[in-house]
Amino acid sequence: MTYLEFREQWHEVGCFNVYQIRAWNPAFDRSNLSRWVKRGYLSKLRQDWYAFSDLKGNPEMARYVAQRIYTPSYISLHYALSFYGIIPEAVTDITCVTSNRTTAYSNDFGHFSYQTVKPALFFGFRQMPLSPKGSYLLAYPEKAIVDLLYLSPQYNTAEALLELRFDEWWMQEELNKERLMSFAEQSGNKALIERVKLLIKTIPND
């Protein structure tokens, strides 16, 4: 099989693993992948996972890669907070939440970190479409906040919460307080619920 034949079949998929290829063509020679990586046609993402190198630099593709190479997971925490404009920092590393073990990967598409939460907290995300095909999971802004407070219990005073520098206008005008509180209560974690209540109290009224 030539690279052009392979590209015609798989380029729209963008990111794929060895098992998908073998299901498509059981006779596929896996050594082709290593050869195409050496030639710069493909990028190796992690063991058994690859993507087309010409898709590097596309933020949407990087978010898609984050979802594909480690499951179950969804994008949350600092990357999601930056995406929504809740924190002032520009975050390039893609931070995710998983019910699997904590891990991280670096490849040509970026650095991807995955923080473990209990299965009871694995909710509060939505499916974001990817052009021309596929999608990735992104936390609602309120869930990104809940995830951060769950994984960072040191934010348990008003002074510590202010250090997060959440955007004041967003907190006053865009934050859905009912959804935020509902997500916290759904966790069943009393300490987390108290931290969320305290955060709501720190929001200016004008």
Image (cartoon, rainbow, N blue to C red):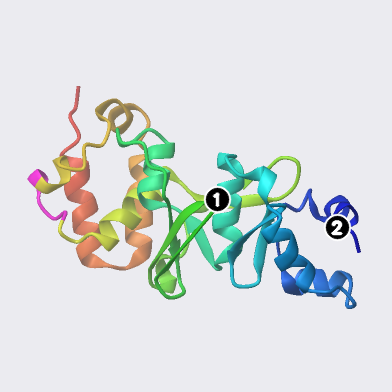
- Dominant SS in magenta: loop
Number of callouts: 2
In this orientation, which residue lies closer to the viewer: 133 or 197?
Answer: 133
9 drawn magenta: no
- x 40%, y 65%: residue: 121
Which residue is at 13% across, 55% downward?
156
Residue 128 % position (x, y): 61, 45
- Please tell me the numbered disc located at residue 109: 1
Quadrant into which the N terminus falls: bottom right
Instruction: Check disc 2 and report the residue beneath it.
Output: 6
Residue 66 sits in which quadrant? bottom right
Most foreground residue, 108 or 169: 108
| Residue 203 location (% of width, % of height) | 20, 35
The amino acid marked with disc number 2 is Phe
Residue 63 screen position, x and y as percent = 55, 49
Could you tell me how far apart the alpha carbons at marks 2 and 1 are, in whole angstroms? 21 Å
Q: Residue 157 lies in magenta, yes or no?
A: yes
Depicted 203 relative to depicted 34: above or below = above
Tell me which residue sits at (33%, 30%) in the image: 170
- The quadrant in which the C terminus is found is top left
For the residue carrying disc 2, how many other residues have a C-alpha within 10 Å: few (<14), some (14-19), or many (20+)? few
Specify the segment rendered in magenta.
155-159
Residue 46 in view: yes
